[in-house]
Amino acid sequence: MKVLAFYSIKGGVGKTASTVNLAFIAARSGFRTLVWDLDPQAASSYYFRIKPKVKGGSKQLIAGKRELDDLIKATDFENLDLLPADFSFRNLDLVLDDKKKPTRQLKKLLIPLAADYDFIFLDCPPNISLLSEAVFAAADALLSPIIPTTLSLRTLEQLKKFIENHDLAMLQLIPFFSMADRRKKMHRDIMDTLQAQHPEVLTTAIPYASDIEQMGLARMPLGGYITKSRSTLAYNELWREILARISK
């Protein structure tokens, strides 16, 4: 089982869209896949048409009074399940802080699912917090979408520094470009420069495209309502790159 966390300090960078679409592609490829929506905004849950509700909320979940497999919901797609968000997840930092070894709690919850899933995708809220540290401890790889703008690059540097300063060398950081518009010279220049200086950045860029924005209307991954587009091709190529990177 591989745990892939989709994470960015900055919001609005296409994190949830990437989580949902790549999980769909993984499931369609035959991998048993689970998405855990850790964001109290519950966008992943919304895209899969599943009510954002966890019985007992975050407190009972972290206390171990509810097993994860009791909370998992099937989606409309084969091999793809969802652990929905709950508004109480806004208090996860406080709940974790009450536990011994708080950063190990998510990993402890995920271990029993190893026999059931090939991949677990974590859709994480955009901040640096105790929950973030628990995600970093649980994940095999951190997928970080970045928009080709100065502010997005700054948050990537902050994330890299945090990983270096917190003894997380075993955590594989995999940045990739999201919401990229090659019609803009600034986007092209930043992408070219960053990829030349940082080989860890994946070469496939997810475009800024209207079909991705329409996911909110369709309430499903792109592949559920579009057979082929520039965006679906980009997500498929990105998944191939991710698989190659995490298999090394």
Image: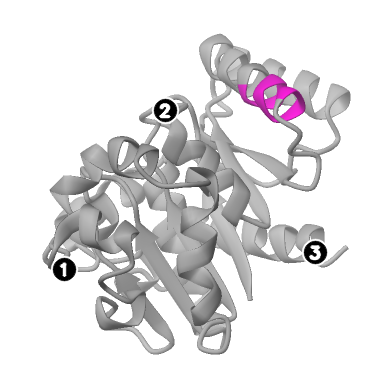
Disc 1 crowd rating (10 Å Cα; few below 14, some 14-19, many 20+) is some
**CA separation in Å, label 1 and label 3:** 31 Å
* Residue 127 marker: 2
Q: x and y percent of residue 76 in the render?
A: 26, 83
* Residue 244 marker: 3
| Sooner in the amino-acid sequence: mark 1 or mark 3 | 1
156 shown above or below 100: above
* Residue 228 in view: no
- Is label 2 or label 1 in front? 2
Tell whether label 3 touches label 2 (CB within 8 Å).
no
Q: Secondary structure at mark 1?
A: loop
User: Does the magenta stretch mainly form a helix, a strand or a loop?
Assistant: helix
The magenta segment: 159-165
Q: Which kind of residue does numbered mark 1 sit on?
A: Arg
**Residue name at image x 87 percent, y 26 percent:** 196
* Residue 49 marker: 1
Q: Which kind of residue does numbered mark 2 sit on?
A: Asn
Quarter of the image for residue 144 reads: top right
